Image: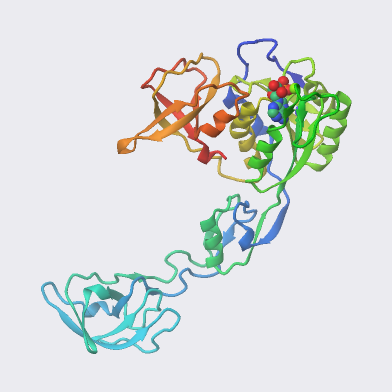
Amino acid sequence: MMTIKIKPNCADNPEFGTLPVNDALARILAAVQSVTGYEKIPVQEACGRVLYHAVHSFVRVPPFTNSAMDGFALNRADLPPAGQTTELVIIGTALAGKPFESTVGSGETVRVMTGAVIPDGADTVVIQEHVEISDQTIRIDARHTPGQNVRQAGEDIQPGDCVLEAGLLCAPADVGIIASMGIAEVSVYRKLRVAVFSTGSEVCDLGQQRAGVSQQTFIYDSNRYSLCAALGKLPIEVVDMGIIPDDPALLQSVLLDASHHADLIITSGGVSVGEADYTKQVLSELGSVDFWTVAMKPGRPIAFGKINSAVLFGLPGNPVAVMVTWCFLLKPALEKMLGISASAIIPSFIATSTSSIRKRSGRTEFQRGILTQQEHGKWTVKTTGKQGSGILTSMSKANAFIVLEHDRGGVEAGDEVLVYPFSGLF
Ligand code: AMP
Ligand code: MG
């Protein structure tokens, strides 16, 4: 059980947070477990699901030795010595699904198509482009290798092989592999149930206007929409819980209710130190929750812990902070909870910054950047301009985060920086 600890917060140190991002992530990963339930599903639905059991094969793939090319099957003993040619008699044809039923003898060949069973007596295929055909014979020269253009039975998969490990997030090719072994159903981790709230008396849903909130003062909820969109890409049952105004009693009852139904609760807003930031107070009453000021920008105030058995993430309210904390703190935790075994590999690489970037040492900064590939494959990056944590369009204009590490100072034009393409994150 986590204990209620009120950590130093923004008020204690207005300039920088206290917990480095990597430490925050390590604590989060240590505190969450993968769900235990699983279900059996048809292989057609396995893409994007996480294997609960490893998949073993009962069969060989390919199941029989077959031709990799259109050409002529023959025995290697009939390949001519260097500098010479040989003539072979065509005794039949083998098509994919229609084998040649007899044996290929010395001095004989069978016309074979890609995927056809290699006839008995043959072990080598000469492609048709390398053959002189006349009537019922072919002539081949000496450029060929014994055994060429033949796919051996079981060369990909053998019976008993552990082909896919438990904890694999199935990609399209994995679905094909499962089918190639004749397996129609697989067991996968059950979907995670995630409840998503927005908080804030100024926050309104589309097509609604909160009573008593004038049009001059409300803002449309964007966080719940971006979060639900991101969650929708994972094997997650999203429970959209709407918007809770800054009302501690209401917040308390809704969060408590969600904790009985969800594996994970995500809120945004109200975790800072403002007068109407009640999430903190309510959470510490309801569960074991840590409040962290993470040394990151954006995304500094964050709540993390548990209410009953539900894991809770209280994200900051600013829309870009929500996106950054989603990518670098929340998604890795979700991946562990989903049963994904491989530690999340988020692709990143080094690019050259084309402009200077202001940055002070002592926190990790996540700037929104536009990556461009130059001649010879080199990548350069520039920021999208205004980097305020409320400027959500900076995410749309960007195709990558420029991540400026904790201890790093400012960046000069021409310096190398670490970039995380959005394509690996969302
Ligand atoms: P807070 O963390 O509650 O102080 O909110 C920080 C900023 O984010 C404020 O300007 C809020 O109005 C804004 N904000 C909070 N929640 C949302 C939301 N769901 N969608 C868009 N902006 C929000
Ligand atoms: Mg608020």
Q: Position of residue 72 (x, y in %)?
A: 29, 79
Q: Residue 230: tell me if it is visible.
A: yes
Q: Position of residue 35 (x, y in %)?
A: 71, 45
Vertically, is 336 above or below 381? below
Q: Quadrant of residue 395?
A: top right
Q: Position of residue 55 (x, y in %)?
A: 58, 60
Vertically, is 386 above or below 183? above
Q: Quadrant of residue 75?
A: bottom left
| Residue ranking furthest to the front | 215
The residue that appears at 73% across and 51% down in the rendered structure is: 37
Q: Residue 199: tell me if it is visible.
A: no
The residue that appears at 53% across and 62% down in the rendered structure is: 176
Which image quadrant shows ligand 2? top right
Q: Is residue 236 left or right of residue 178?
A: right
Vertically, is 411 above or below 158? above
Q: Quadrant of the N terminus?
A: top right
Q: Is residue 376 left or right of residue 55?
A: left
Q: How many marks?
A: 0
The residue that appears at 47% across and 15% down in the rendered structure is: 409
Vertically, is 157 above or below 310? below
Q: Position of residue 60 (x, y in %)?
A: 49, 70
Q: Is residue 189 left or right of residue 425?
A: right
